[in-house]
Image: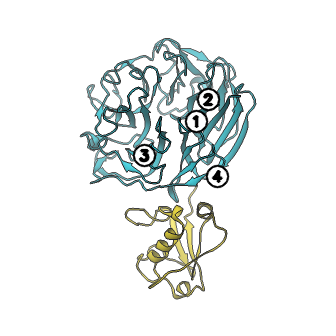
Chain colours: A cyan, B yellow
Amino acid sequence: MTAVRVLVGTRKGAFILTSDGARKRWRVNGPHFGGWEIYHLKGSPSHPDRLYASQSNSWFGQQIQRSDDGGKTWEPVGNKFAYAGVTGTHQWYDGTPHQWEFKRVWHLEPSLTDPDTVYAGVEDAALFRTTDGGQTWEELAGLRGHGSGNYWQPGAGGMCLHTILLDPSNPQRLYTAISAAGAFRSDDAGTTWRPINRGLVSPHELPDPKAEVGHCVHRIAMHPSRPRTLFMQKHWDVMRSDDAGDSWRDVGGNLPTDFGFPIAVHAHEPDTVYVVPIKSDSEHYPPRGRLRVYRSRTGGTEWEALTKGLPQRNCYVNVLRDAMAVDTLEPCGIYVGTTGGQVYGSADSGDSWRPIVRDLPSVVSVEVQALP
Amino acid sequence: MIRVVLPAHLRTLARVDGEVALEVTGVVTQRAILDALEARYPALRGTTRDQVTHDRRAFVRFFACQQDLSHESPDAPVPGAVAAGEEPFLVVGAMSGG
């Protein structure tokens, strides 16, 4: 029978939630790496029992852990993330030049075909890659070096590369997103990059309406069958591109607020998109204390609130950018982790929700694997 | 043998219980102890000092013989009692919340 494995990263460890294909009864396993921040863990699409985890804390720095048995056992692998060449500077909060400093790995994106190849998005923003299962990491320095890196500036959460999308139809094409620099695309497997931010408007952060970089992109999502169409949750605004990021248009439509962090696309319907509206950039909780996932079945603009099974009063949690995921079962499952430690799951494309687990440490990331 | 006491998180990473005993040749300094520690337990690379600059991580402290050696030069000899294996060299996670 098909099984589902949900990988949850929290502020104090990793948890692995498992169920059969019905997704009604769940087992909670963990904490793994108790006491450490687990910004992200993700499985290899080609070898699902190969998992990678980013483990860090302020005392002892960054570790990368690898499992070859679906998270039963783990081995630390390489954790040296050295910027290539001259490290250089970016802009600090006050506009002065500031030396690039490695702080942590925010996101791990395993190759679609090779379990030993993984991309890592780090703070201060850069993209690294391993081709030996995590033993060694090399920076893809063309991203920082394409020309705008000197002008990047950290957002409130740090200057992090948090989104990595791999185009399944074109191995040469990768997308990344950085807070607060914007979105970038490579068409040569990560060697060279260019900003893809035309159409983004950030009047509260950037007075220049044509600014090429400096946009606080929170998350980008893509359906594998339609890789030129991208959906973006920005600091404010929900955006869509149909030309691989060359241009963007606002599809926030009737959302109660277009601020938020995660965005995801239904596994089987490329025009069905999910966001979690958050009240504002300083009030990081749902409007009116009601946690609502919003779904558009029209590729944006027209949105409906999904409420059944989600707390509709006195709820003041946040859902962070990496904390929403979809599974590939039929019907599609959706999973949302909150800063209050709840992981909610829907086994019917979002029509109804149930808490899988309620009292974890604050959830940073959620990924899901459908297993044979 | 040099005796090293690690904090709980680093004992877990290194998969050791209790003290670690390390062979250190030549003058026993902080750098020599940490070099030997990382050679024996590669998972500890980068946990007490930066992997490129070898600067001590901000929230890590080194204690021995009831002294805080954290701000000593990494190339200064450690107290004789540590070099003689009579007292342990302590790696400590600095007090900070979260």
Q: Specify which label sits upstream in the sequence, 4 or 2.
A: 4
Q: Name the residue under label 2.
A: A335
Label disc, if present, on residue A122 of the rendered structure:
3
* Residue sitting farthest toward the right: A25
Q: Are marks 1 and 2 on the same chain?
A: yes
Callout 4, which amino acid? Gly
Element type at mark 1: strand
Dot 3 surroundings within 10 Å: few (below 14), some, or many (20 or more)?
many
Q: Residue B77 carries which label?
A: none
Residues under numbered marks 3 and 4 in contact, where contact means CB atoms less than 8 Å apart: no
Q: Which amino acid does label 2 sit on?
A: Tyr
Q: What element carries label 2?
A: strand
3 or 4: tag closer to the N-terminus: 4
| Location of residue A367 in the rendering, given as x and y in whole percent from the top left corner | 57, 35
Q: Which residue was labeled with disc 4? A: A34
Read off the residue under disc 1.
Answer: A366
With A281 as the anchor, is A67 left or right in this view? right
Which residue: 71% across, 40% down?
A: A28
Q: How far apart are marks 1 and 2 (CA)?
A: 7 Å
Residue drawn 27% across and 31% down? A212
Left or right, A368 with reference to A271: right
Cα–Cα gap, marks 3 and 2: 24 Å
The subunit letter for the residue under badge 3 reads: A
Q: Same chain, marks 4 and 2?
A: yes
Tell me whether marks 3 and 2 sit on the same chain.
Answer: yes
Q: Report whether A28 appears left or right of A259.
A: right
Q: In which quarter of the image is the C terminus of chain A?
A: top right
Mark 1, chain letter?
A: A
What is the x, y in percent for residue A296? 52, 15
Quadrant the N terminus of chain A occupies:
top right
Kind of residue sitting beneath label 1: Val
